[in-house]
Amino acid sequence: MVLNYIWIAFFVISFLIAVVRLLFMGDSSVFPAMMDSTFESSKTAFEISLGLTGVLSLWMGIMKVGEQGGVVSAFARVLSPVFAKLFPDIPKGHPVTGSIFMNIAANMLGLDNAATPLGLKAMEQLQELNPKKDTASNPMIMFLVLNTSGLTIIPIGVLVYRAQLGAAQPTDVFIPILLATFFSTLAGLVVTSLYQRINLFNRTMLLTLGGLCLAVAAVIWGFSRMDKDQMNTVSTTVANTLLMTIIVGFIVAGALKRVNVYDAFIEGAKEGFTTAVRIIPYLVAILVAIGIFRASGAMDMLIGGIEATVKACGGNADFVGALPTALMKPLSGSGARGMMVDAMTQYGADSFVGRLSCIFQGSTDTTFYILAVYFGSVGIRKTRHAVACGLLADLAGILAAIAIAYLFFNN
């Protein structure tokens, strides 16, 4: 519903601004430019979706191999002590733990469409444990905040879009996204724990969070001592090495488990192909709306106003061009994806704005969409502190993304 209103607003606002430009400024080119943008944006959306087909098929296939090869269940066993502390109301050994982990794992790998079915399954199982069927339980809220904070280890979708739009090194945003999404998730976890009075000061959580914080601090310290070229080289090498290790590791695990790896891959790849085709109308819809919004001059007015305000306050306004992605992300994943693509198309995939828009896209998730879909699927009407915790996690991710982008990419 929110996306519906946003989509309508794009067209109405764009039309009104175009009328003003035509009647009061004598700009007769505005409506032809808006119509040209509809055709160009539609073509761009289809070409991007077509290019995604192969990569989505690859990674959905690899995920299926890892699932059948037992890699997912192995990770679940390793993380079970942490889950027991974060979800104290879930009985030990309950099957929902596996569903939660598989959902989070899919999100970590950037496979949003694969994560949603797993998340809905987890919500159904959590609802079985919920004593108040119309009110969100503590485990439900913690689970959703971990989703909305967008914890991502491998932002496959972002990397694919960068490759499609001509980035010299599509993986150069890998480390920045990892850092930004960590801060977003950490903020969401801490805020939710405060609301739910979960004690994070225990041995298991202190070791886990302390270890993660030290690792992230070490990464930031190491990269802060490098020049820009070294940063790009190291982050690209690490990203590509990790991606290749995951592919080979999942395949080897499947082979050792005596899984028919080829058939498992084909099964997953078919799902990836279907997903790629399914997103075409959504991408067309949002890119056309954004194209019209920009062609009318509305986007320039919005960005110009924010930029003037930031400069008047004495701040560096280089980040402003990427803000539409950050502002759209809590509302709509497809909308934010369209904003990201539009930013890379407008400024260049390797520009500061283009890269920052990618970091915004990968650092948080669609808070309102996730809350509406997940809670709606089980009839939850009273969301309690879920929205507040989710938005605070988003804010932390946005601020972290800006700071990290300046560290890595601002010349």
Image: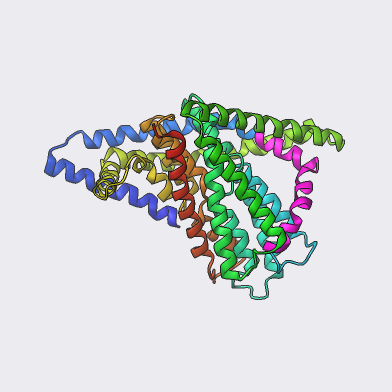
**Coordinates of residue 43 in the picture (x, y in percent):** 43, 30
**Looking at the image, which is closer to me, 1 or 328?**
328
**Coordinates of residue 199 in the picture (x, y in percent):** 65, 67
Quadrant housing the C terminus = top left
Magenta residues span: 59-86
Query: Which residue shows up at 20% across the image and 33% down it?
Result: 29
**Looking at the image, which is closer to me, 341 or 310?**
310
Q: Is residue 376 visible?
A: no
The reply, left or right, for residue 262 in relation to residue 301 is: right
**Coordinates of residue 137 in the picture (x, y in percent):** 63, 70
What residue occupies the far bottom of the structure in this picture?
132
Query: Which residue shows up at 42% across the image and 43% down it?
Result: 286
**Looking at the image, which is closer to me, 346 or 44?**
346
Q: Is residue 61 visible?
A: yes
The reply, left or right, for residue 271 in relation to residue 73 is: left
The reply, left or right, for residue 234 in relation to residue 66 is: left
The reply, left or right, for residue 337 in relation to residue 24 is: right
> Is 69 inside the magenta-drawn segment?
yes
Per the picture, the main secondary structure of the magenta-coloured stretch is helix
Scheme of image coloration: rainbow
Quadrant for residue 18, please give it: top left
> Is 349 inside the magenta-drawn segment?
no
Quadrant housing the N terminus = bottom left
Quadrant for residue 94, please give it: bottom right
Query: Which residue shows up at 35% across the image and 38% down it?
Result: 291
**Coordinates of residue 283 in the picture (x, y in percent):** 47, 40
Quadrant for residue 144, please give it: bottom right
Total tally of numbered discs in the picture: 0
**Looking at the image, which is closer to me, 238 or 94?**
238
